[in-house]
Image (cartoon, rainbow, N blue to C red):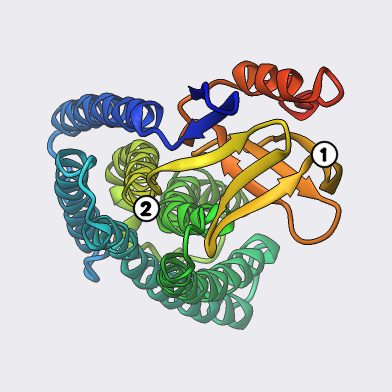
């Protein structure tokens, strides 16, 4: 904030220092996530070695392709993070927007494995239905309730996963559209758009994590319990419970599940870094607002606007959890409120409050009630 001795006015200017600090903090967090990924990969490699080098058993190579897609997402995510970190302070909006699009595409690489897994699940449900018909055709067949429940559950699971993949594709495409919508709006901060993009990036790895946990649960709990119950019922010799080779890959799915948690957090952190860099690239220059004895002069898209003190209903703060954080909001008697992130200014809220009090002889203050949890 600058003091103008000619008319005793205080001017708050746009400032990049604190936003740059937040960006550097996100870069450090990304490096820590990268270290976590390295530790998880080392753990997964040790687990794989201790379990006698398990390889995918399935005739339909779902596990193998899932590992390939997840590995590709990991490598591309790493490259995007390194590029985003190196160019974080660049003023190129296009480069930062490209990083966000690359992250959306990287997350999308985790959707094809779910589609393959849904197909395998549906195939096994068909096999179980055939086995169930075979049991019904035999004399002295055991209780088939558990087998019926498994066949129905597998069919429903395959249907839900396929619908979830379609939803994921839609979310990623909408994320790209919302990114464009945000960028074409002058000085827009993209509060809703950035949240949606974050959610779209989180969705595929969490969906694949659900598939991994489902595979482990089915192979280690559901299938053994059904086999055990059939053995206790002493089924006919002709009734052999159909096995699926993919269930022998449970240890690989466990390793993948552990990796996906950290990968999801890593991609989300990189998305926040690219979003913050976009905010920095679109940060205005010059004076943000001016306080004098007459009132305020605020910087709007169409140019400066004078607001006399009687024309102002309230001056306060608005809480925001994501970057660039809480806002200074000026509410006029008529018209839309004017706001600017406090992180964009070269002053702290206390200084602004002092300037308002000085210019109005303590008749007006800055209401920071909404920011009590932060300041």
Above or below for 1 versus 248: above
For residue 321, say whether it is visible.
no
Q: Position of residue 241 (x, y in %)?
A: 45, 63
Please identify, in this view, whether the residue under mark 2 or under mark 1 is nearer the observer. 1
**Residue at horizontal 27 percent and vertical 64 percent from the top:** 62
Nearest to N terminus: mark 2 or mark 1: 2
Q: Is residue 121 left or right of residue 253?
A: right
Q: Which residue is mark 2?
A: 282
Tell me the crowding category of disc 1: few under 14, some 14 to 19, or many 20 or more residues within 10 angstroms, Cα based: some
Residue lying furthest front in this view?
6
In the image shown, does 331 or 247 lie closer to the viewer?
A: 331
Above or below for 58 versus 285: below
Q: Is residue 135 left or right of residue 215?
A: right
Q: Which residue is mark 1?
A: 314
Q: Secondary structure at mark 1?
A: strand
Q: Secondary structure at mark 2?
A: loop
Q: Position of residue 22 (x, y in %)?
A: 38, 29
For residue 76, say whether it is visible.
yes
Q: Is residue 166 left or right of residue 113?
A: right
User: Are the residues tagged 2 and 1 within 8 Å (C-beta)?
Assistant: no
**Residue at horizontal 83 percent and vertical 18 percent from the top:** 362
Q: Position of residue 336 (x, y in %)?
A: 74, 59
Distance from Cα at disc 2 to Cα at disc 1: 27 Å
**Residue at horizontal 65 percent and vertical 63 percent from the top:** 142
């Amino acid at each position: 904030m600058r003091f103008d001795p000619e008319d005793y006015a205080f001017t708050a200017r746009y400032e990049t220092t604190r936003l740059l600090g937040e960006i550097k903090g996100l870069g450090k967090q990304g490096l820590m996530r990268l270290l976590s990924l390295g530790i998880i990969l080392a753990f997964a490699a040790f687990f794989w070695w201790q379990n006698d080098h398990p390889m995918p058993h399935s005739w339909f190579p779902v596990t193998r392709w899932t590992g390939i897609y997840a590995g590709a997402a990991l490598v591309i995510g790493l490259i995007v993070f390194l590029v985003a970190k190196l160019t974080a302070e660049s003023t190129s909006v296009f480069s930062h927007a490209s990083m966000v699009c690359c992250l959306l595409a990287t997350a999308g690489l985790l959707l094809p494995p779910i589609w393959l897994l849904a197909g395998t699940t549906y195939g096994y449900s068909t096999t179980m239905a055939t086995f169930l018909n075979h049991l019904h055709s035999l004399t002295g067949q055991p209780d088939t309730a558990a087998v019926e429940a498994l066949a129905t559950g597998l069919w429903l699971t395959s249907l839900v996963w396929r619908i979830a993949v379609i939803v994921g594709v839609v979310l990623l495409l909408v994320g790209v559209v919302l990114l464009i919508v945000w960028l074409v709006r002058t000085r827009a901060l993209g509060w809703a758009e950035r949240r949606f993009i974050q959610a779209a990036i989180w969705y595929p790895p969490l969906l694949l994590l659900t598939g991994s946990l489902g595979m482990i649960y089915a192979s280690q709990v559901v299938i053994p319990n059904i086999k055990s119950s059939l053995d206790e019922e002493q089924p006919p010799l002709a009734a052999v419970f159909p096995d699926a080779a993919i269930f022998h890959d449970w240890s690989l799915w466990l390793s993948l599940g552990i990796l996906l948690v950290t990968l999801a957090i890593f991609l989300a952190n990189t998305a926040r870094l690219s979003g913050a860099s976009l905010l920095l690239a679109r940060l205005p220059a010059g004076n943000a607002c001016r306080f004098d004895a007459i009132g305020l002069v605020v910087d709007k898209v169409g140019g400066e606007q004078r607001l006399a003190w009687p024309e102002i209903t309230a001056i306060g703060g608005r809480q925001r959890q994501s970057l660039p954080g809480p806002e200074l909001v000026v509410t006029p008697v008529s018209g839309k409120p004017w706001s600017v992130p406090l992180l964009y200014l070269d002053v702290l809220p206390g200084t602004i409050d002092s300037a308002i009090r000085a210019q109005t002889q303590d008749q007006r203050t800055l209401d920071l009630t909404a920011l009590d949890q932060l300041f």
